[in-house]
């Protein structure tokens, strides 16, 4: 079962060429304005790699035709973050502010004008799967879909306590000053190890057939509610309404099972959406 592999971690040095790029990306993410990029670059690559392994031959062929190569599923997994400065209107597409005190998503309250990750996943899927649309529009929608499904599974991209999804909860964690949103965006994924492909393979090995079947179902609304529930039950109780706190080194270790589970769900669900969209 999945739980048996939750803490099976591999810590290996980064290849020199990749390490510099990743360190730069993580440094940029650490100081980027809120809302932060969900999971960081590596987290999105992990989700996309898991999804790539689950695609049908038909979806793979369509992926190659629209993006230029099947490998672009992974390569373009961070595209939606990379263009945010140029496409400011897309900033709110990466999250949904479901108030912490409510039990579930309500579109009229949480996603006015379809300006949130839940609605934009649906829009991207419609465009990507419409063969009557121009190829360029379908390719762009596909890149958004790849990225936003992963975003939705980061718990603090589906919950808010008047703190911009944890961005205003200042955190001291060992020698680093950060915020709660960044802890869940990047520190949790960093702790899994440096190689996205290795982490993805390790996560996939722990997924049972029953879990795979149950995860490849539902809607962006139900997935948002899952993430919101995790934030309510796992993250915010220990915050206790504070805006400044210190976390023990064990906090990241204790959060790894949740991170691995959410990355696994995101990858499997992304594959399911792509397989049922690119037909």
Image (tube, rainbow, N blue to C red):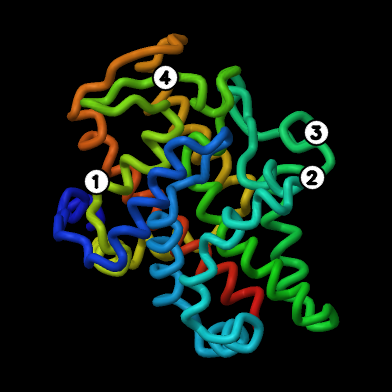
Foreground tag (4 vs 1): 4
Q: Which residue is mark 2?
A: 114
Q: Earlier in the sequence, mark 3 or mark 2?
A: 3
Q: Position of residue 239 (x, y in %)?
A: 39, 16
Disc number lying in front (3 or 2): 2
**Image marks 4 and 2: residues in contact by CB distance under 8 Å:** no
According to the picture, the residue beneath numbered tag 3 turns out to be 108
Disc 1 crowd, CA 10 A, few/some/many (<14, 14-19, 20+): some
Q: Is residue 187 left or right of residue 124?
A: left
Q: Quadrant of the C terminus?
A: bottom right
Who's the residue at 76% across and 46% down the image? 89
- Camera-nearest residue between 75 and 251: 75
Q: Nearer the viewer, mark 4 or mark 3?
A: 4
Quarter holding the N terminus is bottom left
Query: Residue 191, labelled with which disc?
Result: 1
Residue 94 can be seen, yes or no: yes
Q: CA distance from mark 1 to mark 2?
A: 34 Å
The span from disc 4 to disc 3 (Cα, nearest Å) is 30 Å
| Mark nearer the N terminus (4 vs 1) | 4
Alpha carbon distance from label 3 to label 2 = 9 Å
Mark 4 and mark 3 lie on one chain; the one further toward the N terminus is: 3
Q: Earlier in the sequence, mark 1 or mark 3?
A: 3
* Tag 3 near tag 2, CB within 8 Å: no
Q: Quadrant of residue 234?
A: top left
């Amino acid at each position: 079962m999945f739980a048996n592999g939750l803490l099976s971690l591999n810590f290996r040095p980064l290849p020199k060429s990749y390490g510099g790029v990743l360190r730069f990306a993580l440094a940029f993410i650490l100081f980027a304005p809120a809302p932060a990029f969900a999971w960081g670059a590596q987290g999105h690559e992990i989700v996309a790699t898991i999804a790539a392994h689950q695609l049908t031959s038909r979806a793979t062929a369509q992926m190659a035709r629209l993006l230029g190569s099947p490998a672009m599923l992974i390569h373009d997994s961070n595209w939606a973050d990379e263009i945010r400065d140029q496409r400011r209107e897309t900033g709110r597409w990466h999250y949904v502010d479901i108030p912490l005190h409510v039990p579930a998503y309500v579109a009229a309250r949480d996603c006015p004008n379809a300006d949130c990750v839940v609605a934009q996943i649906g829009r991207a899927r419609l465009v990507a799967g419409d063969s009557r649309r121009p190829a360029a529009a379908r390719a762009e929608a596909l890149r958004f879909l790849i990225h936003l499904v992963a975003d939705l599974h980061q718990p603090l991209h589906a919950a808010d306590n008047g703190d911009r999804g944890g961005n205003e909860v200042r955190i001291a964690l060992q020698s680093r000053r950060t915020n709660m949103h960044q802890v869940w965006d990047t520190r949790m994924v960093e702790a899994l190890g440096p190689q996205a492909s290795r982490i993805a393979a390790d996560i996939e090995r722990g997924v049972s057939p029953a879990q795979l079947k149950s995860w490849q179902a539902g809607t962006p609304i139900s997935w948002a509610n899952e993430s919101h529930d995790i934030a309510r039950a796992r993250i915010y109780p220990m915050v206790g309404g504070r805006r400044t706190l210190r976390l023990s080194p064990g906090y990241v270790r204790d959060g790894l099972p949740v991170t691995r589970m959410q990355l696994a769900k995101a990858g499997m669900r992304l594959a399911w959406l792509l397989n049922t969209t690119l037909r």
